[in-house]
Image (tube, rainbow, N blue to C red):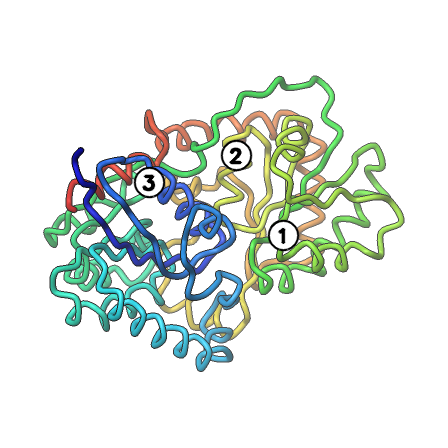
Amino acid sequence: MKIKKNIKVFIIATEQSGDNLGSDLIKYLKMKYKYNISFYGIGGDKMIKEGLVYTNHVSDFKSIGFFEILINLRKILSILSSNIKEAIKLNPDLVITIDSPDFSFRFVKRLKNHLVKTKFIHYVAPSVWAWREGRAKDISRLYDLLLTIFPFEKSYFKKYNLKTVFVGNPIFNNRTKFKIPKKKKYIALMPGSRLNEVNSLEKYFKFIINHIHSSYPQYSIYIPTLPYLKKRITNLTSFSKKKIIISDNNKKLDNLFPKTKIAIVCSGTAALEMTKKNIPIIVIYKLNLFTEILFSFFVKTKFANIINIMAKKSIIPEITNHKLNISKLKFSFDSLIKNEKLQKLQIKNAKVYINKLKLGKNCSYNACLEILKII
């Protein structure tokens, strides 16, 4: 009987989206039976369920901008230092960092000289096409492999001789097909996957809830959320006299999505998910004012939504940062929900770009194959 090769992996995911990708990746890597792979590091409930021995949980990371990071800097630096010590002690064969570039790159930079035989992999490229393009050169010195989820990113890193592979986008990991009912009676509200996002958008979602109840009573509201945010969302909606569905149950949500008229979505992966499901959306987002001012000197794109960035024009309506106010949100919401042609046009135009993010296999399966090539 052939002895399996033991592989130790130290993996970092500091966000919920990273936990989703990380759990999928762990699952596929474990399927490769000629290896006995163990996983250590930072992750969330899904990665832990797949077998991660965790050093920190994703819920320890709640910052979204420069100002918020400053407030939590001591805690973040402490987590960084403790995980560097854990990784040196483990001496892993692979270090995999998922997204979270500011934390991930500092981690690898401080770790690399201590682990000369370790291979370093980053999953989800930083948005160098939006700001700080010079990071591409620095990143190329740190990693042996970069796995991207947008096809246009490869050129930014290949010129610095970093092996870069587009593995597909995670929004296509779940390919469940639904019957689309003629009558759509739900409106989805998606205030974000981080506590800071929920807090910054709270008053806008409260307004929309009241507006729907008073002006569009024929529609019911549901809010997809995460287990650790469920209590916060429940408190946010406690003023409502009408029942609002708050759920972290994927099966229940999969039943609601096809019945959804439109959605108001915090910018990010959720916006792409809803677009893929052919649900017309409005994207909203709000950074701390200090963070917005600081970022304005560096950001090269005028759009927040990836579909608009790829198209170089506004396909998905978005209201962000200082432009976000109640009157603009009301106007945008009323314009979209009352106009079937506008809804269909958004779906049609977005589909051209959303289809460019799709490959034949699950992105984490593709990532797994690329990772195994460098073991």
Note whether 22 is above or below 236 in the view shown. Answer: above
| Mark closer to the chain start, 1 or 2 | 1
* Residue at image coords 19%, 64%: 138
Which numbered dot is residue 30? 3
Residue type at mark 3? Lys
Note whether 176 is above or below 363 in the view shown. Answer: above
* Residue at image coords 33%, 42%: 149
Residue type at mark 2? Thr
Would you name the residue on which mark 1 appears? 227
Separation (CA) of disc 1 from disc 2: 23 Å
**Image location (x, y in percent) of residue 19:** 45, 51
Note whether 62 is above or below 352 in the view shown. Answer: below
* Residue at image coords 48%, 48%: 49
Q: Residue furthest bottom?
A: 74
Q: Residue furthest front?
A: 1
Note whether 154 is above or below 102 in the view shown. Answer: above
Q: Are marks 3 and 2 in contact (CB under 8 Å)?
A: no
Which numbered dot is residue 67? none
Would you name the residue on which mark 2 appears? 275
